[in-house]
């Protein structure tokens, strides 16, 4: 499972991986993550999302509108992998108005003891000219940490129903 998160980094790139334990069954958590056409199901900072190509399968493209207050307006994102057997999803950012150029990420879910699971999200992104690896990763990590905490909340609420 860890091997999904090993990404080669070019000299001008940085990356990281974030881990979240969730007190809900894997099948439920995966059902929330896998909906490429509905990232707002758990991601923060998104005001809306529209599909530009595909219907949520591999190769689909979505355009995500970002809420005000962030240094970003839109993001065009392509679904690169959706593996329902191993619970792995990859997507890349292919355009938009923001500073995460060449961003690509992998999200996996694994079962833990009990009714728990562990979600790992890793990514690679270009470091923009005039910025440092540390600042670029800190920015992306902050967003992803918020999203993973939100995924945990949403899933745990659903699991309690
Ligand atoms: C994800 C991860 C990230 C999304 C970032 C890091 C983003 O959607 C936001 C602000 C930005 O400046 C970049 O898994 C971008 O979605 C909230 C628009 C890409």
Image (cartoon, rainbow, N blue to C red):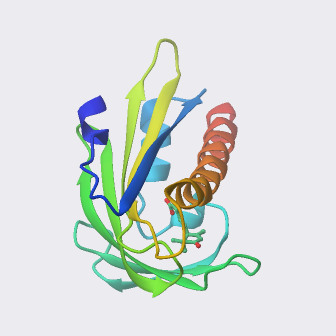
Q: Quadrant of residue 82?
A: bottom left
Q: Quadrant of ligand 1?
A: bottom right
* Left/right of residue 106 with respect to residue 128 in the rendered view: left
- Counting from the top left corner in percent of width and height, residue 153 is at 69, 42
In the image shown, does 66 or 59 lie closer to the viewer?
66
Q: Quadrant of residue 43?
A: bottom right
- Counting from the top left corner in percent of width and height, residue 95 is at 39, 84
In the image shown, does 103 or 113 lie closer to the viewer?
103
Q: Could you tell me which quadrant the C terminus lies in?
A: top right
Residue 131 versus residue 53 in the image, above or below: above
Q: Residue at x 30, y 30 (%)?
A: 2
Q: Residue furthest right?
A: 69
- Counting from the top left corner in percent of width and height, residue 67 is at 70, 78
Residue 32 versus residue 51 in the image, above or below: above
Q: Is residue 85 visible?
A: yes
Q: Could you tell me which quadrant the N terminus lies in?
A: top left
């Amino acid at each position: 499972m860890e091997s999904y998160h090993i990404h080669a980094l070019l000299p001008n790139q940085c990356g990281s991986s974030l881990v979240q334990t969730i007190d809900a069954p894997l099948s439920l958590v995966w059902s929330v993550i896998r909906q490429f056409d509905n990232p707002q199901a758990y991601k923060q900072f998104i005001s809306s999302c529209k599909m530009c190509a595909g219907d949520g399968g591999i190769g689909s493209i979505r355009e995500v509108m970002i809420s005000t207050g962030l240094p970003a307006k839109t993001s065009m994102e392509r679904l690169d992998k959706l593996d329902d057997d191993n619970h792995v999803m990859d997507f890349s950012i292919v355009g938009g108005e923001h500073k995460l150029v060449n961003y690509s990420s992998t999200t996996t879910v694994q079962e833990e003891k009990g009714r728990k699971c562990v979600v790992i999200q890793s990514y690679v992104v270009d470091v923009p000219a005039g910025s440092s690896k540390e600042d670029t990763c800190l920015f992306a990590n902050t967003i992803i940490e918020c999203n993973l905490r939100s995924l945990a909340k949403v899933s745990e609420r659903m699991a309690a129903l």
